[in-house]
Image (spheres, coloured by chain):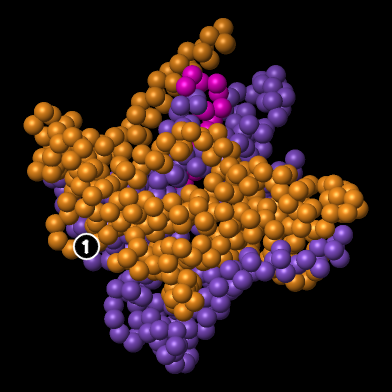
Amino acid sequence: MEKAVKKYSPIFVLPTLLAFTIGFIVPFFEGLYLSFCQFTTVKNAKWVGISNYTRVFADEAFLHSFGFTVKYAVVAIVLINVIALGLALLLTRNIKGTNIFRTVFFMPNLIGGIVLGYIWQILINCVLALVGQPLLALNSQAGYWGIIILTAWQQIGYMMIIYIAGLQNVPEDLIEAAQIDGATQWETFWKVKLPMIMSSITVCVFLTLTNSFKLFDQNLALTGGEPNHLTEMLALNIYQTFYARAGLQWKGLGQAKAVLFCLLVVVISFAQLKATRSKEVQQ
Amino acid sequence: MKKAKEKRSNAIWSVILGILSILYMYPIVMILFNSLKDERAISTNTAFQLPTAETFAGLANYVNAINAQGFLKSLGYSLFITVTSVAAILLFCAMCSWYITRVKTKFAQGLYFLFAFSMVVPFQMVMFTLSQTADMLDLNTPWNIWVIYLGFGAGLAVFMFAGFMKSIPLEVEEASMIDGCNPIQTFFMIVMPMLKPTMVSVGILEAMWVWNDYLLPTLVLDIKKYRTIPMLIQYFRGSYGRVEMGPMMACIMLTVIPIVIVYLAGQKHIIKGVAAGAVKG
């Protein structure tokens, strides 16, 4: 059978492979190469060695955006996962209205980042005006918490669904056995349910982590990096380096930043996956 | 005794979650109310008030958004791009995944690894070179941008399809081959029907992504000619000068309402699809 399939391989593989080459493979390696060049379009690239990279580390706005992203990611990951897991525990207890609650909490997910960003920009600015604080464009503290609240609002429902699926897979008799042995609800959660849903936790932490580092639309729409690049995250900083300024030096710098950013996301993803996979319980 | 206590605490939680859900919906409801107000009545001081007889503007903002801002055109582009991209991804990636799981060559394995890797890579890494490549190949119109989406969305789709295909028994396919089907017939008549649930999951996840995607179409399409819905909303705010809040909020609502309708209609599938995607992701 393998032979027969192989004979038809062009039909099966080529369409996807061609698009994948155009959409990913070529741009990826070209990008890697261009990070060592000075250019304004792909065609006028001139090799300049690692000078783009040395300039990345002298770019204070970029270093600040890295710090800001980390500060955001830590709070967002904890907040989203704790609340999502809490909601999932409540929604697996046969509470009246469970279906409605699940529907409501999941809904913001389907609305795109740009639209969500503007919805929250209007709301937050109104609240800030009401309490006499400077608006988002001048208020980096509010911008920071705004991004956290907005992304938490968006992602809690998604993670909640994954946790609910995990909790529903915990065998009923295991929980019953624990209760017969005299375990309290609290103990049942910590010693039975939590170890059993470790794989859901892996997935959710992984998703929130990569989402946090890749965050772009919400950042662009809610604060646009204002004031003075103080609420600019990594992805937005790279975008601005590419497109907000004209000049020979910027595109190469932007591409070098993008390569480092990519490396960072890949390393984090694999490290995180490995770390939590080792804690999972084999079922 | 214990039952009664549990019942009472569940009732209390029910009330708390009820209040929480209302708060959860508030941002959208607030935009809805303000989108119905007269342009002059929209200010930060009155934003939290319901429209009154004086400030109520009916659907004027909506008419403005549809007529003056070209909302329907954007809706059409977004719909077309989403449908073509998702259809292409479902068909071609399913075929490709079948090859990858059934043929055990170095090439197939390497390809699988590359697809998985592409899922992790952030878009910023390729955005500049991708938009230039797209320009060079004339893949920069709504009619053929699906090729780019197929390329960049293949990672997730192949990963999920391949994950499922590994679990279906080979014997079924072998039997159909012995009965005289060639691989193409086997794939479309035997494998495809079995893939249906995974197709739904992949389709939902990819549709959510393409529909809401902002950066890729912005960089690839000519913004003066073609605007998808996220581009239109951003264009509202991004352009300089005074922003007309009324039409903008109407535009936001026009974007949100169809999503909510689709969601309520296909809720079961959407939630299942997300859960299934996550388990493998």
- Find residue B205 and report its horizontal and vertical position in percent: 54, 49
- A96 drawn magenta: yes
Chain B on-screen colour = orange
Q: Is residue A105 above or below residue A126?
A: above
Would residue A39 appear left or right of B267 to someone viewing this image?
left
- B190 drawn magenta: no
Q: Quadrant of residue A222?
A: bottom left
Q: Nearer the viewer, residue B254 or A213?
A: B254
SS for callout 1: loop
Q: Is residue B118 visible?
A: yes
Residue drawn 35% across and 26% down? Answer: B19
- Find residue B112 and report its horizontal and vertical position in percent: 69, 64
Q: Nearer the viewer, residue A28 or A215?
A: A28
Q: Quadrant of residue B101?
A: bottom right
Q: Is residue B174 visible?
A: no
Residue drawn 73% across and 44% down? Answer: B194
Q: Is residue A1 above or below residue B59?
A: below
Give the chain coloured purple. Answer: A
Three-letter amino acid code at the position of disc 1: Ser
- Find residue A65 and report its horizontal and vertical position in percent: 36, 66
The residue segment tinted magenta is: A78-97
Q: Looking at this rendering, what residue extends furthest in the top direction? A: B1
Residue bearing mark 1: B239
